[in-house]
Image (spheres, rainbow, N blue to C red):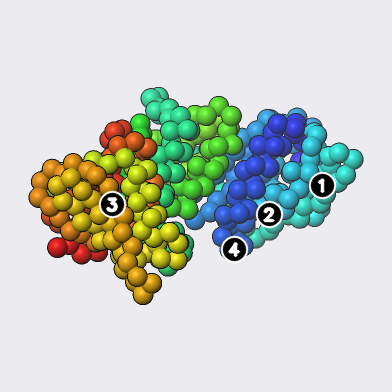
């Protein structure tokens, strides 16, 4: 019979993890379950489309070894209430949790296939690349800004993906793309939702480090303190809808100029001050010494201008204001280079070498 206790620190870590999982887990019955395995430690495992998560925490085991399936949502609601040591005792219906002079009964989940962790979590290779969470979270966070969201009405999540290659992360949806420098080895793609989950869960860990490496069968293995993630990367090397950024990065520009990123964002805001109009076309006219943004609708014409230094021929292009804002948001503050490519794209880069690519609505 299972009978173990957890200290306050372990409970708080579990509470944070299951709170995130309860927010993201799909509404399918067999994906709302956490498996608890007890020996000289406890292993809590949950799975979802795109990843399997396992967290190992120490326990004081006063019973035997065993396992039980519990509901993730109920764990997420009960664990935060355990402000002190909590005792978990197996009963006929499931698990009895006692803490702070109160008790809760969590029903056992049945008819759920157990999760075979021996197959899921391969042994870590001898050489593991350690990536600070702050860098990874920052890189993913910036890249996700340039990726389509659920509101973009893309039903297939495979189209909401980011591609991680050696020393860079690429996010794209066929209209805009961003490349962020990351000290990550290997090459794999992540669904947007899984990437967001990884960033949030990584922030739970106080040590601030992630160990990441590709493993077999289209997965990557991620370790962070006591957290283990086996994240599905079984997508094409270049997920559907991706711009071929390798070609666009190498293509010479026909015209270019530099401008402060914040100044460009302010110009866009002056042109379209309301969010309701942010997806309309903006005309960008660049001539030697000057830049002009122009929009026109039933309310009249809006203009914004700035002084710049142009290299190459003058040009007139049109782009989506919302997509341009998102691409600018993925670049670091400071001076950025804006390069017009004849294939109908604008390539922008910052001093750190990060690149954002925007498809034009039309060119003239």
Question: Between disc 2 and disc 3, whose residue precedes?
Answer: 2
* Mark 4 and mark 2: Cα distance apart in space: 11 Å
- The residue under the point 71% across, 49% down is 75
Residue denoted by label 3: 305
Q: SS for tag 1?
A: strand
Image quadrant occupied by the C terminus: bottom left
Residue denoted by label 2: 73
172 up-or-down from 89: above or below: below
* Mark 1 and mark 2: Cα distance apart in space: 16 Å
Residue denoted by label 1: 96
The nearer-to-camera label among 4 and 1 is 4
Question: Between disc 3 and disc 4, whose residue precedes?
Answer: 4
The nearer-to-camera label among 2 and 3 is 3
Question: Between disc 1 and disc 2, whose residue precedes?
Answer: 2
Q: Are marks 3 and 1 in contact (CB under 8 Å)?
A: no
The nearer-to-camera label among 3 and 1 is 3
The nearer-to-camera label among 1 and 2 is 2
């Amino acid at each position: 019979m299972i009978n173990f206790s957890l200290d306050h620190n372990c409970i708080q870590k579990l509470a944070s993890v299951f709170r995130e999982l309860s927010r993201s887990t799909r509404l399918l019955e067999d994906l709302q379950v956490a498996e608890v395995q007890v020996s000289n430690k406890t292993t809590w495992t949950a799975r979802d489309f795109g990843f399997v998560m396992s967290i190992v925490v120490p326990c004081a085991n006063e019973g035997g070894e065993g396992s039980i399936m519990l509901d993730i949502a109920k764990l997420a609601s009960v664990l935060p209430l355990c402000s002190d040591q909590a005792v978990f005792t197996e009963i006929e219906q499931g698990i009895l949790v006692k803490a702070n002079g109160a008790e809760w009964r969590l029903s056992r989940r049945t008819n759920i296939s157990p999760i075979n962790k021996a197959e899921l979590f391969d042994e870590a290779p001898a050489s593991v690349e350690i990536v600070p969470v702050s860098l990874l979270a920052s890189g993913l966070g910036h890249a996700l800004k340039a990726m389509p969201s659920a509101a973009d009405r893309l039903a297939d999540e495979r189209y909401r993906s980011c591609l991680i290659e050696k020393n860079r992360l690429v996010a794209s949806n066929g209209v805009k793309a961003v490349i962020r420098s990351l000290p990550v080895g290997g090459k794999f793609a992540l669904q947007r939702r899984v990437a967001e989950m990884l960033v949030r869960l990584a922030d739970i860990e106080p040590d601030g480090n992630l160990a990441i490496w590709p493993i077999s069968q289209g997965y990557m293995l991620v370790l962070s303190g006591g957290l283990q993630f086996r994240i599905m990367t079984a997508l094409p090397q270049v997920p559907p809808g991706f711009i071929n950024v390798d070609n666009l990065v190498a293509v010479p520009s026909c015209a270019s100029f530099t401008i402060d990123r914040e100044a460009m964002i302010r110009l866009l805001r002056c042109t379209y001050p309301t969010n309701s109009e942010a997806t309309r076309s903006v005309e960008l006219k660049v001539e030697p010494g000057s830049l002009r943004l122009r929009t026109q609708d039933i309310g009249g014409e809006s203009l914004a201008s700035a002084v710049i230094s142009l290299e190459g021929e003058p040009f007139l292009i049109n782009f989506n204001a919302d997509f341009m804002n998102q691409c600018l948001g993925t670049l670091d503050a400071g001076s950025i280079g804006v390069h017009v490519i004849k294939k109908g794209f604008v390539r922008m880069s910052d001093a750190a070498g990060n690149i954002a690519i925007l498809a034009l609505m039309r060119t003239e």
